[in-house]
Structures are given as C-alpha cells and as structure tokens.
Image (cartoon, rainbow, N blue to C red):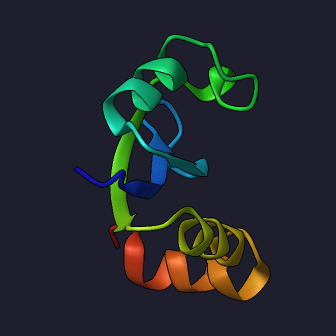
Amino acid sequence: MKEVFFVYILTSIKDPTKVYIGKTTNLEKRLSEHNSGESQYTKTYAPWKIETYVAFSNDKSAAAFETYLKSGSGFAFLKKHLLPK
C-alpha cells in the first residue's frame, strides 16, 4: 500500500482561537503527541482536536499545501473554508 501524507489542522480545546497546521503520515499518533505535550509548539494549548485534514499521495504536494496554509492568503482561506464558523 502506498504511503499517504496528511496536512492537518488542529484547534485547541482550551482556546479555540489557537490553530496549528502540520503534516504527517500517521494522524492518530501525531494527535496523541500533540496532546501529550511532546510537541514544543502545541503543549501550552493542549488538548487539541482535529478540525480537518487533507490526504495527499506524495510528500511534495502535502508540503506545498502545508506551506500555503501557513502563508497569509492560505491562512485566510483556512479560516474561511476549513474551520467551523
């Protein structure tokens, strides 16, 4: 089976205004790492929940989409279309 790459968007349960964007091949494991404080960037606002994710068949496309979502126009797109209103 071919590896799948996920770009995921998390929101903090503690503070829903906090959003984290990441990339992984194992969503369940990565969410567990964020919620157990293993990630320096997310431990302050743990616990986290997955709001949405997009699957890619190659790492290059996933990395490009992650970079886009972290850009100004990409983050605006994320807030308008990928997060709950």
- Residue 45 screen position, x and y as percent: 60, 28
- Say which quarter of the image contains residue 40: top right
- Residue 80 screen position, x and y as percent: 47, 84
Q: Nearer the viewer, residue 50 or 4?
A: 4
- Say which quarter of the image contains residue 59: bottom right
Query: Which residue is pictured at 33% across the width and 67% down the height?
Result: 84
- Residue 17 screen position, x and y as percent: 56, 52
Query: Which residue is pictured at 51% across the width and 19% down the height?
Result: 33
Q: Is residue 42 left or right of residue 52?
A: right
Q: Is residue 81 left or right of residue 17?
A: left
Q: Nearer the viewer, residue 66 or 82?
A: 66
Q: Is residue 85 left or right of residue 70?
A: left
Q: Is residue 62 above or below residue 30?
A: below
Query: Which residue is pictured at 39% across the width and 74% down the height?
Result: 82
Q: Nearer the viewer, residue 24 or 70?
A: 24
- Residue 79 screen position, x and y as percent: 52, 75
Query: Which residue is pictured at 41% across the width and 20% down the height?
Result: 32
- Say which quarter of the image contains residue 77: bottom right
Q: Is residue 29 left or right of residue 72?
A: left
Q: Residue furthest left?
A: 1
